[in-house]
Amino acid sequence: MSVRGGIDICGVGAVTGYGWGLPSLWDGLRSMKPAAALTQGYGGSTSGDTADTAEHCGWVARVPDGGDPVDGRGRFSRAMRAAAREAVDDALRRGWQRGRRVGLLHAVVLGEVDLWKDFYLVERGDIRARDYLALMPSTPMSTLMQEYGFHGPAMNVSAMCASGNAGLLTAKLWLDAGLVDDVVFVATDLSLTPENVRHFVRLGVTVVDADPLDACRPFQEGSRGFVMGEAAVSFVLSRKARVPYATVLGGAMSHDAYHATSIDPEYSQVRRCVSEALDDAGAGADAVGYVNAHGPGTRQCDATESALTEEFFTEDTGLYSVKPLVGHCQAAAAAVEVAVAALGYDRGFVPAPPRVAQAHPRLRTGVVDIGDRLTLKSSLGMGGHNSAVVLAPPA
């Protein structure tokens, strides 16, 4: 049980490009092989000629088909409920006893894109009422609440790529305010239609034409950006955990109010976010052993997080990003990366991607001994969303 005023992660569930279930994620990371695969239709033309690229393959870490058809027609709702179900089952096995008021938070930016695409282009809007309801963002939340008989508040959270951190901090606010006894938090993003991927290629941040470890090299020379991924990741959050994975001590959020895609080059609001996150967690910068970075491998994000790591933390603070392995999972990105850190505390190490080029001197690769120091998880969302959470090993 937490004694530090934070909230405990007492159950974890995951569906990723590695497959359905937490073991698939951990085994995939340990293999040091990216979840992405060459997939037909993702050739990524920047010319606008979609017909020309339909038969060409590109690298994406797409969640494979699967899940329970009872959970919905689309991969999105199936993955969301599968991840949440796995987290709840995991927490119960580890001794969690649910309270009277269990709330649900769902981090999402684009929901059910496959079904919406079919709704307009294939079915022409002519579907049954129950199938139309399945497109609503409230439906997977409602069905999950019904399945478990949860009666706390239920709400969607959206802060672009920072949505995972935003959801964790919202859960902590609910618990601090006494609105709930426990929170089930899920972050879901299964939005990799060829059209969506192609637009990120046009923005100059996504790479589909090269092996992920060669193309996505956070904090290394020659990085071209990120390979896109999908995921649904869930946590059970409580102050009544018996055997937690990790504790969320605190965190902060801010907004650049600067540009639709670019980070303010002054870094003032990102800097404030990191400083306030440490203050909220009651942690000194020298207690942080690792920065689990947003680390998408883009030039401006690498420069920003490198500068802040050097400014705030001591020379023995390591830096790593798992995006070369799991892909950039958009709304679920921060949640996937928090899950990796939490599992790392439980298992004693984090599998970080291999180094393939000259790198920042603090970059950690391979098997990283997590130890008992704190982890700062940063996440920078498109449009100026800044977030940071501070994680600790269980007390």
Image (cartoon, grey):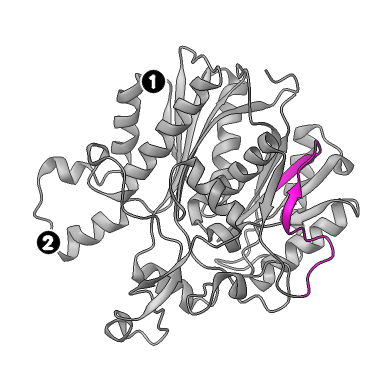
Locate the C terminus and report the quarter of the image it occupies: top right
Q: Nearer the viewer, residue 41 or 385?
A: 41
The picture quadrant where one finds residue 42 is bottom left
Q: Is residue 385 left or right of residue 185?
A: right
Is 214 rendered above or below residue 117? below
Identity of the residue drawn at 52% across and 48% down: 25
Q: Nearer the viewer, residue 230 or 33?
A: 33
- Mark 1, other Cα within 10 Å: few <14 / some 14–19 / many ≥20: many
Residue 145 rendering spot, x and y as whole percentages: 35, 26
Determine whether the residue tagged by mark 2 lies in a helix, strand or loop.
Answer: loop
- Which residue does the numbered mark 2 point to in the structure image? 124
Residue 272 numbered mark, or none? none
Is 83 rendered above or below residue 355? above
Q: Is residue 354 left or right of residue 159?
A: right
The residue under label 2 is which amino acid type? Answer: Arg
The residue range painted magenta reads 358-377
- Which residue does the numbered mark 1 point to in the structure image? 150
Q: Nearer the viewer, residue 140 or 280?
A: 140
Identity of the residue drawn at 49% across and 52% down: 331
Residue 208 rendering spot, x and y as whole percentages: 48, 75
The residue under label 1 is which amino acid type? Answer: Phe
